[in-house]
Amino acid sequence: QDGELVIETDIVTGNAKRKWNTPEGVNYIYKKQKNRILRGPNYATPVKYWLPVVGNIGIHDAKWRKEFGGDIYLTNGSHGCINTPTEAVAQLYELAEVGMPVVMFY
């Protein structure tokens, strides 16, 4: 914000082993929602913060994760979303605006 780093946190991205990699590129936050249920073929998972950035891929909390970062994504990653610690995504949610760019890369 104003040229200064405000949030720095470890995350977990898409499960590379299952080929659910988080897509790379410059994307944009296109919606902000609280208390949403994310649904897929075999899951319905409630999250407190949801910031979708490309298709059904977004940044959200992941209360089921005990740790973030490192190479977790290689075998125990997400379905493509960016799993973020609750405290960090809560702060991001307050700072983020619809239309804000998100640069996604490995």
Image (cartoon, rainbow, N blue to C red):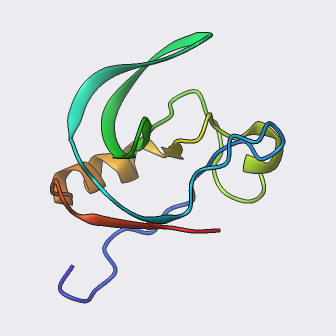
Quarter that holds the N terminus: bottom left
**As drawn, which residue projects farthest toward the bottom?**
3
Q: Position of residue 95 (x, y in %)?
A: 18, 60
Above or below for 104 versus 72: below
Asked which quadrant contains residue 32, the reply is top left
Q: Tell me: 51 left or right of 56.
A: left
**Residue 78: x and y, percent?**
63, 37
Position of the C terminus, as image quadrant, is bottom right
Q: Nearer the viewer, residue 21 or 83?
A: 21
Image quadrant in which you'd find residue 55 = top left
Left or right of 19 on screen, residue 4: left
The answer to which quarter of the image holds residue 11 is: bottom right
Tell whether 94 sits left or right of 85.
Answer: left
Q: Position of residue 31 (x, y in %)?
A: 21, 42
Q: How many marks?
A: 0
Q: Camera-side residue: 103 or 45?
A: 103
Determine whether 35 is above or below 51 in the image: above
Residue at 29 percent across and 56 percent down: it is 92
Query: Residue at (32%, 37%) from the top-left corner?
Result: 50
Residue at x-position 23% and y-position 30%: 34
Q: Is residue 104 left or right of residue 95?
A: right
Q: Is residue 1 above or below residue 64?
A: below
Q: Which one is nearer the viewer's eye here, 11 or 31? A: 31
> What residue sits 50% from the left and 30% below the top?
63
